[in-house]
Amino acid sequence: MQTVQNTDHGQLHYGEGDTSFKAAGGYEGLVQLCEAFYNAMQQLPQAQHIRAMHPADLTESSEKLARFLSGWLGGPKLYREKYGLIRIPAAHAHLEIGPAERDAWLECMRVALQSQPYKDDFKTYLMQQLYVPAERSRTRD
Ligand code: HEM
């Protein structure tokens, strides 16, 4: 299991409480991550198909993802605060997302994580965890 050091309480695990949110640098860290994520989507050849599904201006898409990830990682539920309840499958139901689109999305995230000041074990943990909603976003084989 992945762990982080906490000097007061020994070992804390990612996924417990707001450990992951803190490991991601809080909301400011997530804003940086999501900017890097959409920069990668602009640039990676294999992501052009999913880039085209998004609005021309990615500002709001980036903010929505950062807000979603805040709550998803155990931090404040900032997406819900501004936009209301979200279910990941329903939010993507109108899109053509198969394995190639899912993998392109995850590749953008992998590239984005390379430029973040996170611990390596947290990057690995995050990629493993993100596979779950990425797979749930899939709308076709
Ligand atoms: C599997 C590949 C995925 C593709 C191709 C994809 C694509 C998209 C697109 C095109 C939008 C609409 C953007 C907009 O209108 O601004 C969107 C919205 C969104 N996606 Fe994804 N997405 C994927 C996976 C994920 C994953 C894994 C997460 C969360 C970890 C996620 C979280 C969101 C959120 C929070 C929104 C905003 C929904 C809304 O407010 O309407 N997506 N996605």
Image: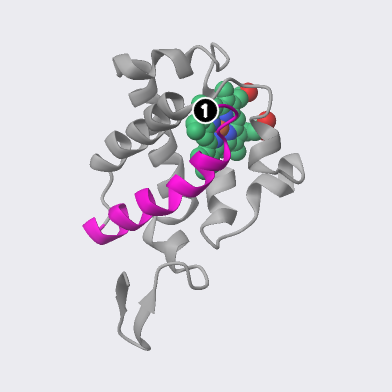
Q: Main secondary structure of the magenta part?
A: helix
Residue 84, given in percent of the width and then of the height, sits at: 77, 44
Q: Residue furthest front?
A: 141
**Total marks drawn?**
1
Q: Which of the 4 quarters of the picture holds residue 64?
A: top right
Q: Which of the 4 quarters of the picture holds residue 79?
A: top right
The residue shown at (40%, 13%) is: 48
Quadrant (top left, top right, bottom left, bottom right) of the N terminus: bottom left
Q: Nearer the viewer, residue 13 or 76?
A: 13
140 in relation to 26, above or below = above
Residue 63 in sight here: no
Instruction: Judge left or right: residue 80 versus residue 124.
Output: right
Q: Which residues are magenta?
A: 119-141
Residue 92, given in percent of the width and then of the height, sits at: 64, 30
Residue 82, given in percent of the width and then of the height, sits at: 72, 42
Residue 81 in sight here: yes
Instruction: Judge left or right: residue 110 versus residue 89.
Output: left
Q: Was residue 120 drawn as part of the magenta stretch in this picture?
A: yes
Q: Which of the 4 quarters of the picture holds residue 94?
A: top right
Instruction: Judge left or right: residue 10 versus residue 35.
Output: left
The residue shown at (50%, 41%) is: 135
Q: Quick one: SS at disc 1?
A: loop
The residue to which callout 1 is attached is: 141
Residue 96, given in percent of the width and then of the height, sits at: 58, 20
92 in relation to 89, above or below = above
